[in-house]
Every structure is written in structure tokens, then in C-alpha cells.
Image: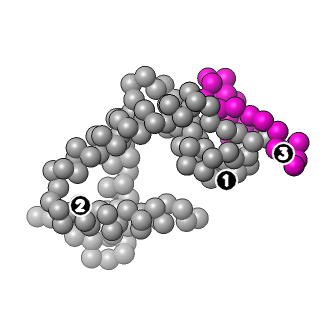
Amino acid sequence: MEKVARTDAGLASELRMSVMRLRRRLANERDPGNDLSIPMMAVLGGLFRYGELTVGELAQLERVQPPTMTRKVNGLEEAGHVARRPHESDGRVVVVTLTDHGRETVLADRKRRDEWLSRQLRDLTPAERQTLRAAAPILQKLSERD
């Protein structure tokens, strides 16, 4: 018998479990040549999506403290995934950019995960895929809230 969330609390519980399981499954589909952690990949993904960002902006985006982000950026810079430069109008601020290597890493990782998820979507009915199309922006909106 299929369990149906009849209350907001039930829906919240089912969504939490489903999203967490899907996240873990997608984490297992990482590019085998990529040894970066999920949080490090999230930093690269943010830079890929939004372009150059300051360390503070990255920290805010990833909801971590600036010293934590500085450590992540240091590791990514040492591995050649990002580069830093002074801010154009405030030399005290550092701007972080993706290098070509960082961009290639993001694209390879996304390609592998997208291919896996596309294969899974093929097994769904057209109505199920349409439901997911409608749900995707709502899930995005939920993920961006404080």
C-alpha cells in the first residue's frame, strides 16, 4: 500500500526522506576521477552558476562562516580549481573565480549525475515526469529559504 502524506507534517517527513535518499544516490554517481568532497563541489557549483564571488558571498551562499569558506577556497586553489584576485574597488576583498580545470571538474561531475538521473526519469510515466517538472522550481524555492 502506498503511503500518502495527508498533512503538512507528513509531507515534510516524506519529502525530507525522499530528497535525502536522492541526494545520497546522486552523490554515489560522482565522476570517478573527482576526489573533491560534496561541500567543495558545492563551492565550484556556486562559482559556475553565479560567476566570480567574494569569499563572503560564497560563505553566505553555502551557509558557512567566512573562515570555513576561506579554508575551502584555499584547498580548491591549491588543487588548481579556483583562482583569487583582489576586488577591483576594494583591495581588501578577495574575488574567487573558477579556473578552466575547475570548470571542467564541474561539467564532468554534472554530466555523470545528469546522465544517471535522465536514465531514471525514462522509467517514469509522462505524467510523473510532468509532476517533477512542476515540482522542481518549488523544491528550488524551498532550498533557498532560511
Nearest to N terminus: mark 3 or mark 2: 3
Quadrant in which the C terminus appears: bottom right
Residue under pointer 1: 60
Q: Position of residue 9 (x, y in %)?
A: 37, 72
Residue under pointer 3: 88
Q: CA distance from mark 3 to mark 2?
A: 45 Å
- What type is the residue that disc 1 sits on? Gln
- What type is the residue that disc 2 sits on? Arg
For this orientation, the residue located farthest to the left is 1
Task: Give me the disc on residue 84.
Answer: none
- What type is the residue that disc 3 sits on? Glu
Q: Are marks 3 and 2 in contact (CB under 8 Å)?
A: no
Q: Are marks 3 and 1 in contact (CB under 8 Å)?
A: no
Mark closer to the observer (3, 1): 3
Query: Is 48 above or below relative to 13?
Result: above
Residue under pointer 2: 129
SS for dot 1? helix
Rendered residue at 68%/45% (across/down): 52
